[in-house]
Amino acid sequence: ISAQNTSTNPTDEVRPIDVLWLYPRDMNIYGDTGNVLTVERRLKLQGYEPRIHAYNQNDQWPEHIDMVLGGGGQDTGQKKIGEDFQRRADDLRKLAAEGVPMLVICGLYQLFGKYFETQDGTKIEGISILDAYTVGRDVRMIGNLTETSDDFGQIVGYENHSGQTFLGKGAQPLGTVAGEGMGNNGQDHTEGARVNNVIGTYMHGSLCPKNPAIADFLIRKAAEHRYGTYEVRQTPEMAAELARIDADAHNA
Ligand code: GLN
């Protein structure tokens, strides 16, 4: 994925938004890359210049970060990133405290909590941005997932995890399972977690192509972080394309 100039931007001012893409090598299953592609496209169509920084273990940490995205992964992938992730924990906690929006799916959602104890009893430490912990069980929770959220309305996606997540008082659920699916743990009907502008969720799908309101929330918060305000600058062609994409998303 390469950052390109938005030559169709109706103003001359280039407005970069730097997106940190966490561990695409090990944490990127069930199409979670779709979240990155969607954010990149929607940023361009709203007159921003996306700069996507893929970060794997031992890579250089980007100078500017306005948004953080991360996907799911197998237990083995979660173990592989563990050490490097702990080294970056302070940087990520600082960004979260500054209000940088973050979206982390499944395996990284679990590691944004306090810890993930896998089925074999290994405890993988998290970075405690989200007040939640996860315990691996021998039942996989697989299938379509639908939830309702006060902030985003209906959210649809697909879940596939054996970790059961339980929220503490410091985290709100992203939504309430409504209809299909198990959610955080199959017991309390909560799904995902939200603290400040950080969202963790089990929703694969990918999430953002099917739920553009979440992509636009991340973009708004990223723009506010970088520029103090969020301002769409688009030609009528850009607006029309965005409307077409939105119409398709709701049919998907
Ligand atoms: N390994 C974790 C689990 O099974 C996360 C899986 C995922 O990211 N889909 O719970």
Image: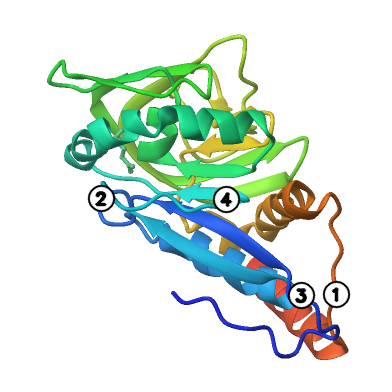
CA–CA distance in space, label 3 to label 4: 18 Å
CA–CA distance in space, label 3 to label 1: 5 Å
Judged left or right of residue 137, residue 198 is: right
Which element type, helix, strand or loop, lies under badge 2?
loop
The answer to whether residue 178 of the structure is visible from this angle is no
Residue that carries the numbered disc 4 in the rendered image: 65
Q: Quadrant of residue 122?
A: top left
Comes first in the chain, label 1 or label 4:
4
CA–CA distance in space, label 3 to label 2: 31 Å
Task: Say the numbered circle drawn on residue 233.
Answer: 1
Comes first in the chain, label 3 or label 2:
2
Comes first in the chain, label 3 or label 4:
3
Q: Quadrant of ligand 1?
A: top left
Residue that carries the numbered disc 2 in the rendered image: 26
Give x and y (percent) for residue 5: 63, 83
Which element type, helix, strand or loop, lies under badge 1?
loop
Relative to 224, say whether 18 is above or below.
Answer: below
Which element type, helix, strand or loop, lies under badge 3?
loop
Judged left or right of residue 218, residue 189 is: left
CA–CA distance in space, label 1 to label 2: 36 Å
Which residue appears at 39% of the width and 61% of the height? 31
Determine whether label 1 and label 2 are within 8 Å by CB: no
